[in-house]
Amino acid sequence: MKYFLLIPAIGFSLFSCNQNSDKKNLAADSQASENLETCYEAVHGQDSVKLSVIYSAGNITGSLLYNNPQASNSSSGTFTGTKSGDTLKLLSRTVTGGNISFNEIYLLKKSGKLYEGIGEVEKINDSTTVFSDPTKIDFNKSFVFSKTECNF
């Protein structure tokens, strides 16, 4: 009779230990994937934009590179922001020809791609623009970013 009680107790102990191990592995995988860099590229005519996006603890950071062959200068910069639903709400700091500007960027994440939002903007000061009404941003008329290698 003692053996009948001992066998289920051992089985339950092994099952519990295995579940705790699975939970620890899941937490570690989640944390590792949250700090991974994901890169995107979009091409519109002769213009291209590359993004490097890093998700960490609910915040988003990254870098961007605009390449416009018709302009004398390309621009590059960094951004910070947050994710709200499927939308990345970013504030970029871009340097173009020695001039620094700050701009809001909204990107809609859908089907593994990022869709840049465009809309009416207003200037807060000489170097900063934000969307006048974020509810009226159109995600169907600008750059569509696809995942790419992180090599820029």
Image: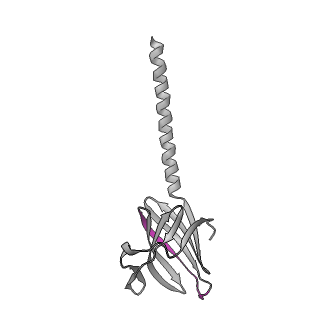
What stretch of residues is rendered in magenta? 70-84
Is 91 one of the magenta-colored residues? no
What residue sits 50% from the left and 79% below the top?
94
**Relative image position of residue 22 (x, y in whole percent):** 50, 40
When the figure is inspected, residue 33 is found, relative to residue 103, above or below; the finding is: above
Side of 51 where 119 appears, left or right: left
When the figure is inspected, residue 2 is found, relative to residue 152, above or below; the finding is: above
Residue at the extreme front: 140
Quarter of the image where the C terminus is located: bottom right
When the figure is inspected, residue 121 is found, relative to residue 115, above or below; the finding is: below
Is 83 one of the magenta-colored residues? yes
What residue sits 45% from the left and 12% below the top?
2
**Relative image position of residue 145 (x, y in whole percent):** 55, 69
Please count the marks in the image.
Answer: 0
When the figure is inspected, residue 36 is found, relative to residue 42, above or below; the finding is: above
142 or 60: nearer the viewer: 142
Tell me, what colour scheme is on the image?
A: one colour
141 or 24: nearer the viewer: 141
**Relative image position of residue 58 (x, y in whole percent):** 43, 60
Residue at the extreme top: 1
What residue sits 49% from the left and 19% below the top?
7
70 or 75: nearer the viewer: 70
**Relative image position of residue 19 (x, y in whole percent):** 48, 36
Main secondary-structure element of the magenta-colored stretch: strand
Quarter of the image where the N terminus is located: top left
